Image: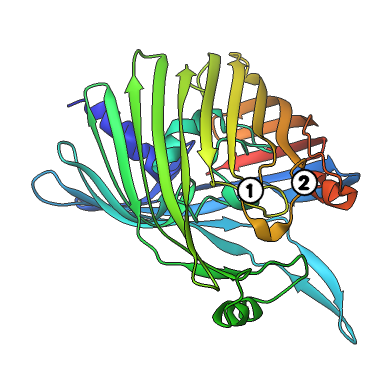
Amino acid sequence: MNKTLVATALAAIFLVPSVSAIEIYKDNKNAVEIGGFIDARVINTQGETEVVNGASRINFGFNRELTDGWKAFAKLEWGVNPVGSSDIVYNNRFESVQEEFFYNRLGYAGLSHDTYGTLTIGKQWGAWYDVVYNTNYGFVWDGNTAGVYTYNKDDGAVNGVGRGDKTVQYRNAFGDVSFAVQAQLKNSSFYTCDTTDDITQAQCQADWESGDKAAQQVEYNYTYGGALTYKATDMLTLTAGINRGEFEVSFGNGEQRTAIDVIYGAGITWGNFDNDGLYAAANFNRQENHDTDNIGRLIKDAYGIESLVSYKFDNGLRPFISYNVLDAGKDYVIQPNFNADPNDEFKRQFLVVGLHFVWDPNTVLYIEARKDYSDFTSADKDQEARMALSESDGVAIGIRYTL
């Protein structure tokens, strides 16, 4: 058993992609640590310049030594917004409204053993992330083409590929090979209608119950996934994996249909992003019914590529370049209720260049710039504009202070 590889696998599920924590309590059985970072930046994009939060977070880790080599542990992590976000609203009087300071990112508990592996239950990074995390090191414009942050760049909670909700996961390692398998045990359903107008779930449900063929009840329940990691050499790592779920669609007239949500792919990594020297990584995926376009329409099928190359000098400077593409082509909309033009085209494509100054391992100053090359062609120009709204050129400078 390669205990170093087991330790690496455990570290991956505690805080991906980088791990940093301060031990605040320890006795002969229990330990508590605090981790996370504050990331504040100034960004210019879509014709505006403002101060924004850079996915700042705080987490607590708990570890307990048990008998016969077993350990129990837990992790709680919240996203925080240190820069503030207040808006003025008017409802017969002016009011100031603030967004929530905390939001849930991770929360799970588990057991681990050097021989028998690790079992975790809760909201945690999915097995699929093991396959593609290697290109997700840009601070501002991270990867949105590897099938992780699904449903218009959310956290991948619904289908378990990012920070999956209600997930049971098992990990272990044998020699230079480690693996993860998981099941997402949940029950969820919603209603949709054949209309381009705004409509409530309650009205769609009423239409479905009345026998309207255009109304649909959609169930999206369990998902399953797995990943393999092969540490070929000290510098070369290979990954591969798959994640699968199902949409069960019942029409108002009694017809039923099943759509499979699946993504599979592989990745390759050379080096370590935090170490001096060359780092290079790439991953490729194929997906069906797995993600949505920028206005919420389910994508029938697509392929995605992410790549990143960086070089960290001994003076702390780390330039990098990253290229990402998610190409669904034309006629990609699966659901008929959106009345999509078959000539609508979806191709998210962008280049990111950046320079990080790693003052010390826990303090990084950075500048990053994004150039968009996406193609969201549509005969409906209003729809085309809405598709392109979140895919703009931009530049940002900031500081990341890690605990």
| Residue 400, picture quadrant | top right
Name the amino acid, label 1: Lys
Which residue extends farthest bottom?
92
Horizontal arrangement in the rendering, residue 121 relative to residue 336 (left or right) = left
Horizontal arrangement in the rendering, residue 71 relative to residue 206 (left or right) = left
Q: Position of residue 367 (x, y in %)?
A: 75, 30
Secondary structure at numbered mark 2: loop
Q: Position of residue 163 (x, y in %)?
A: 48, 50
Name the amino acid, label 2: Ser
| 18 over 125 or under it: above or below | above
Of callouts 2 and 1, which one flags the residue occurring earlier in the amino acid sequence?
1
Other residues around mark 1 within 10 Å, as few (<14) / some (14–19) / many (≥20): some
| 377 over 2 or under it: above or below | below
Residue ID for mark 1 = 153
| 289 over 312 or under it: above or below | below
Q: Residue at x 79, y 29 (%)?
A: 373
Q: Quick check: marks 2 and 1 in contact, CB under 8 Å?
A: yes
Residue ID for mark 2 = 390
| 350 over 126 or under it: above or below | above
